[in-house]
Image (spheres, rainbow, N blue to C red):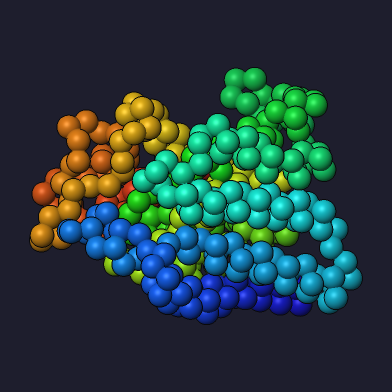
Amino acid sequence: MEYVLFVSILISFILAVSFLPMWIRVCRKLGLVWEDMNKFGHPRNVASSGGIIVIMAFVLGVLSYIALKTFLFGGQSKALEIFALLAVILILGIVGLVDDLLGWKRGGLPMRIRLLLAVAASIPLVVINAGTHFMNLPFLGAVNFGILYPLFLIPLGIVGAGTTYNFLAGFNGLEAGQGILILGFLSFVSYATGSAWLAIVGLCMVGALIGFWIFNRVPASVFPGDAMTYGIGALIAGMAILGNFEKIAFVVFIPYILEVFLKVRGRLKKYSFGIPTKDGKLKMPYDKVYGLEHLAIKILGSGATERKVVYLIHVFQLLFILIGFLMM
């Protein structure tokens, strides 16, 4: 009977595919469009910040899950944790939208303000003392972090994942595809470790992302913006905290950690985009590699296209998902 709860995932998907066409039309009418940097000539015709629709579809899908659980199955024991997680994602979604409106070419929100707001966004999980204070660490085994877990590790996880998920981005379908892979796997981990409620929450975002991917794949008609990437990163961290599988989530997130190091190598000033040519191919924008996107272009050589770069990064991500699976 509880399989009816999967309706919530379908609701997230339907809301995303229903509202995105309207969002795209309004953005084009108002001129809220961005350049597609990996297309020759950089056409300025792609609707901006479609991620806000993804966040809306996700939140409403999760709320429908709570409603079904409450009225059909007599209550929701994890309502506090779910609402705290929704609060985190909504706050970061708003921060991301403001960052989008200020414009990435102008630098968006100052880094210091962005980090402070991300710390503030973690407060709902801090005040409910989410997760457990124990973590299994390599060579050390189970370590009890005590009060440091809610006061330091939870904000660190939310800030770290929320603000770096958008580092590996800039290609049609990349952010959404990565989110589908990572959150789909973490939802499986949640279910396998006894947190079926958390699996449904994660899959609601997967449903919304699948709906978004339809419009964001090559050639994209809408971009996610930081409104979506901040929310996905926060959800990855939130699921790891609430499901107590931080070690697996860390392994799955390694491609983003590598991306951070590569971006720091370029002093956070090197863009991820390739140089598009008339025949639809991409060339290396720099002599050195400053991101996994550049590495993918280098590996693919003269045959590099936007779609192939995205698929190669997905394959790289799947390798770490496989490692995470073997750790279970």
Residue 22 placement, left or right of 218: right
Residue 259 placement, left or right of 301: right
Task: Residue 328: tell me if it is visible.
Answer: no
**Which residue is drawn at the image coordinates 54% and 51% (left, top)?**
98
Q: Is residue 96 above or below residue 25?
A: above
- Residue at the far top in the pictured view: 140
**Which residue is drawn at the image coordinates 38% and 32% (left, top)?**
268
Viewer-nearest residue: 23 or 71:
23
Where is the N terminus found, in terms of image quarters?
A: bottom right
Where is the C terminus found, in terms of image quarters?
A: top right
**Which residue is drawn at the image coordinates 71% and 53% (left, top)?**
87
Viewer-nearest residue: 173 or 31:
31
Viewer-nearest residue: 80 or 124:
124
Task: Residue 212: tell me if it is visible.
Answer: yes
Q: Is residue 267 above or below residue 254?
A: above
Q: Quadrant of residue 10?
A: bottom right
- Residue at the far right in the pictured view: 74
Q: Quadrant of residue 267?
A: top left
Residue 128 place in picture, x, y as percent: 82, 43
Residue 257 place in picture, x, y as percent: 45, 34
